[in-house]
Image: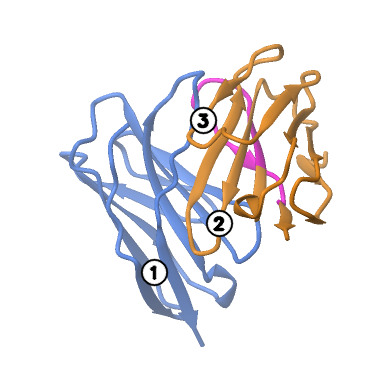
Chain colours: A blue, B orange
């Protein structure tokens, strides 16, 4: 699976959009980009995933660059409850589905 | 539909004691996983079960055993607990190929 690089931390103002970058320069053609988050002391929570097209759901939007070497998770209107560690994971879709979690980005939403 | 449940939520053990962490899912998922998370660290895979009747080692399997009891249940056993096994343990499940992985609320284990 391709390795990902994320900034260790970032701050965001409540009500503003939070843009979380992720670099995955060694991604291969059949690897998807997944985003999870972990709010303090809770189990990780799935947010969104995509292959090459931009994706949007009720939680967030995922923008993947045309060369697929990087992506951005967008939380459109951050709230205090969005304070969490956000993980960007790249891997193929297969039955042998082992997620490798790195250090992630600690996002702090401030009032 | 409770999703993924784990018991117990908290446990304190003395060095050398044994215990079993229980995990169950009611989503009819095929694959189940056990992770551990040490303070300030990401999750590390201990064992997984791709389907009922099969189990495989992950990154950090030493000191643990698992049992896939049936499609719903996947247990993690510590035969002789050590302080290095103090951690938060998460169970997860997934339906099939590359779909979303759902996590339980975690078991916080302290070994003294």
The label number, if any, that marks residue A35 in the structure image: none
Q: Nearer the viewer, residue B59 or B93?
A: B59
Label 2 near label 3: C-beta < 8 Å?
no
In terms of image quadrants, where is residue B34?
Answer: top right
Q: Which residue is mark 1?
A: A18
Of the image marks 3 and 2, the number of the one nearer the N terminus: 2
Q: In the rendered picture of this protein, how many numbered marks are placed on residues?
A: 3
Q: Which residue is mark 3?
A: B58
Q: Nearer the viewer, residue B13 or A34?
A: B13
Was residue B81 drawn as part of the magenta stretch in this picture?
no
Please identify the residue farthest to the front as the structure is shown.
Answer: B16
Quick one: quadrant of the N terminus of chain A?
top left
| Badge 2: residue crowd in 10 Å (few <14, some 14–19, many ≥20) | some
Q: CA distance from mark 2 to mark 1?
A: 27 Å
Label 1 near label 3: C-beta < 8 Å?
no
- Observer able to see residue A7: yes
Please identify the residue farthest to the top as the structure is shown.
Answer: B53
Rendering coords of residue B42 (x, y %):
48, 53
In the image, are marks 2 and 1 on the same chain?
no
Q: Chain of mark 3?
A: B
Q: Chain of mark 1?
A: A
The part of the chain drawn in magenta is: B91-106
| Badge 1: residue crowd in 10 Å (few <14, some 14–19, many ≥20) | many
Report the residue at 71% width, 14% height from top: B52
The label number, if any, that marks residue B38 in the structure image: 2
- Observer able to see residue A14: no
Rendering coords of residue B55 (x, y %):
63, 19
Query: In this rendering, which labeled residue sits more in front, label 2 or label 1?
Result: 2
Compared with B72, B14 (above or below) is below
Was residue B101 drawn as part of the magenta stretch in this picture?
yes
């Amino acid at each position: 699976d391709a390795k990902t690089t994320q900034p260790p931390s970032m701050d965001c103002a409540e009500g503003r959009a939070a843009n979380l970058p992720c670099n995955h320069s060694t991604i291969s053609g059949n690897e998807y980009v997944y985003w999870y988050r972990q709010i303090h002391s809770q189990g990780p929570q799935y947010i969104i995933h995509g292959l090459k097209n931009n994706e949007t759901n009720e939680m967030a939007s995922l923008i993947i660059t045309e060369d697929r070497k990087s992506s951005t998770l967008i939380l459109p209107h951050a709230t205090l409850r969005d304070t969490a560690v956000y993980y960007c994971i790249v891997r193929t879709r297969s039955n042998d589905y082992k997620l490798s979690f790195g250090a992630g980005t600690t996002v702090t939403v401030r009032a | 539909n409770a999703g993924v449940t784990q018991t117990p939520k908290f446990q304190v053990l003395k060095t050398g004691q044994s215990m079993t962490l229980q995990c169950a899912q009611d989503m009819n998922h095929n694959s189940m996983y056990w992770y551990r998370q040490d303070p300030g660290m990401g999750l590390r895979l201990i064992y997984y079960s791709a389907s009922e009747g099969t189990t495989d080692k992950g990154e950090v399997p030493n000191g643990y055993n698992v049992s896939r009891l049936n499609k719903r249940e996947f247990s993690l056993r510590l035969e002789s607990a050590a302080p290095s096994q103090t951690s938060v343990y998460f169970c997860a499940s997934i339906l099939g190929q590359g779909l979303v992985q759902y996590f339980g609320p975690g078991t916080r284990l302290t070994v003294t």
